[in-house]
Amino acid sequence: MKRIAYLSAVLAALVFSGCSTKEPAIDATANAAGNGSNGGASSGQTSGTNGSAVINAITNASPADSSANGSAGSQIVSVYFDYDKYDIREDMMGTVKGNADLLKNKTFKLEGNCDEFGSDEYNFALGLKRANAVKTALVNEGVAADSISMVSLGEGNPTCTDKTQECWAKNRRVEVKLP
Amino acid sequence: MRYLLILTFFISALWSADATLEVTKNVGMLPKLAIEDASSVGNDSGTRFHKMLSADMNVVSLFDVDDRYATQSFDNPQAAGIHKDAVYILRYRLVPDGSGGYRTDVKLFQNSLELFSKIYYLKQREMLVFLAHSVAYDINAKMGGGPLEWMKRKVLFVRLSGPRRSDIVAADYTLSYQKVVLSGGMYGFVKWANREQTDFYYTSLSDFHPTIYKVNLATGNRSPVISSDGMAVCSDVSEDGNRLLLTLAPNGQPDIYLYDVRTKTKTRLTDYSGIDVSGQFMGEDRIAFVSNRMGSPNIFSKKISESAIKQVVFEGRNNSTCSTYRDWLVYKAREGRGAFNLHLISLNNSSIRRLTSSGDNDYPRFSHDGEAILHIKHEGSRSMVGIIRLGVNKSFSFPLHIGRMQSIDW
């Protein structure tokens, strides 16, 4: 019995001494800027003052990969074209310029897309010429030519499947894909 | 006045229909044929085979086919009761072979006299429709009909199943048999690599650069042929399978190249700064192709060894795809928003015959004997396989129930 009491006392001593050496679970001082990797509320850990504490979520982002284009991807906009045309419209020049600023020093792919009128090679070539027109415009804006690859997907990657003029116009586009 | 209205309606109906209707008025002049089942198999194979064979005999176009199902003993020269007015009786007997196939006996009677008899061995029951095609082919040959070799060939097509998703499917011309032979990527432009249909080419759009692969159908083994930035398509294969016409775009510029399969070397054939695509062999030393060098897509030709270009078609606008057979060329012309029709032109005298009159008709492909043209017909979000038999001036269509066709070959 004495032996059990002794072991219990030693175990209790070990437990309490262990707790005393750990960092506190909620530490008001951990808020200090630049205090290692644990610092700051944005790290997803804890923050607070003496009287309260906030446990932040690790992330609020959606798990869906809405853009595989990295940080700049969400600001890159598709370039749209007229029916059977592959010259860049006046109203799309600003879009191309804006994209060029985001794409400098990046390697990326231009995907040419068409509406559903024609699954033949000519339609694919139209998609490619659209991609090539965007490539030329981006190079003119200072993007390195050898950082750009191209592919035509023809009618195979529609964003819209309705049978309307608006829908077909949405599919006649060039998209930028970052690796 | 009433008769005038009826006549007006009849004429307008004729104008709006495909060429098929032009010849249906002759059906009454054809001898009546009935098909009878003598099988004792305990499943629906007998009735399924009856439907398949009836459909094929309609395509043969030598008979007025009575498609009512009836059974009769195999050797009985007399027709079943409901077929008493038939001149010809085509009778079959499916016998399970014990290993997943059928031995099939077939006889053709003309006015109770046996005209034809043959035994077929089908190794896989799922290929039942190919058995029907073989029987129809033989009956057509026996009756002296036009060439029908195409009926027994396998059809390959790319099926778009969703954005960036597609399959390559092997089928028969009626789409009764379908087998997915490649899936999981994004594909385009299937083309048989040889007459024997043992291998095929396709473009993978999933790779970093579009890449043409060659696949052996039996083993599924595939090997890359050539890649190009922007676009890589096998447009045509020479009769001996040793030369390919490719569309490649190494600098974003789609042009036509001749590719030697044995030496793996390529020669650039066109160098226009716009669009040159869809090269088609016209004999040994000439090609036809689609180009927008006159502002909109049209059909041109050139000798392989020379640079001079000749315009082939002077009618229509937006003529964006073609197929050739000897001195004949079929091309697609845009005729209004969403309306694309096929036209046949003789390269000897430039006479043009309109093959379809409505809808969205695409991707025409001549059969190897020139007797028929296979094509894709789109209707809304659905696709159909279309067959135009030039010799008998008839057309047929067979719906694809899932997905949309991108390309097709046979």
Image (cartoon, coloured by chain):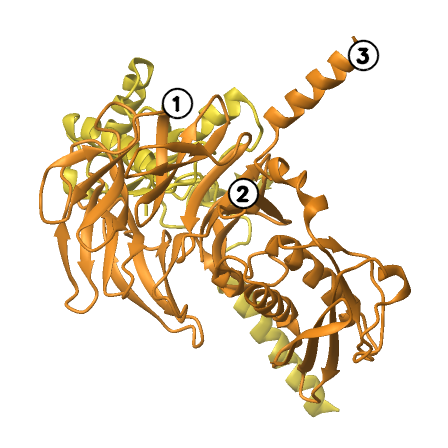
Chain colours: A yellow, B orange
**Residue corresponding to mark 1:** A83
Mark identifier at residue B393: 2
Point out the image quarter for the N terminus of chain A.
Answer: bottom right
Q: Chain of mark 2?
A: B
How far is disc 1 from disc 3 in space, using C-alphas? 45 Å
Front tag of 1 and 2? 2
Between B55 and B109, which is closer to the camera in this rendering? B109
Q: Is residue A175 visible?
A: no
Mark 1–mark 2 CB contact (< 8 Å): no
Rendered location of residue A71, percent (x, y): 36, 38
Question: In the image, is B348 to the left or to the right of B392?
Answer: left
Rendered location of residue B77, percent (x, y): 80, 75
**Residue corresponding to mark 3:** B2
Rendered location of residue B330, percent (x, y): 38, 40
Q: For numbered disc 3, what is the local secondary structure? A: helix
Between B223 and B72, which is closer to the camera in this rendering? B72
- Label 3 vs 2, first from the N-terminus: 3
Q: Is residue B236 above or below residue A119?
A: below
The amino acid type found where label 3 is placed reads: Arg
Asked if badge 1 and badge 2 are on a common chain, one would say: no
Q: Chain of mark 1?
A: A
Packing grade of label 1 (10 A; few <14, some 14-19, many >=20) is few
Q: Chain of mark 3?
A: B
Rendered location of residue B8, percent (x, y): 69, 16
Packing grade of label 2 (10 A; few <14, some 14-19, many >=20) is some
Asked if badge 1 and badge 3 are on a common chain, one would say: no
Q: For numbered disc 1, what is the local secondary structure? A: loop
Front tag of 1 and 3? 3
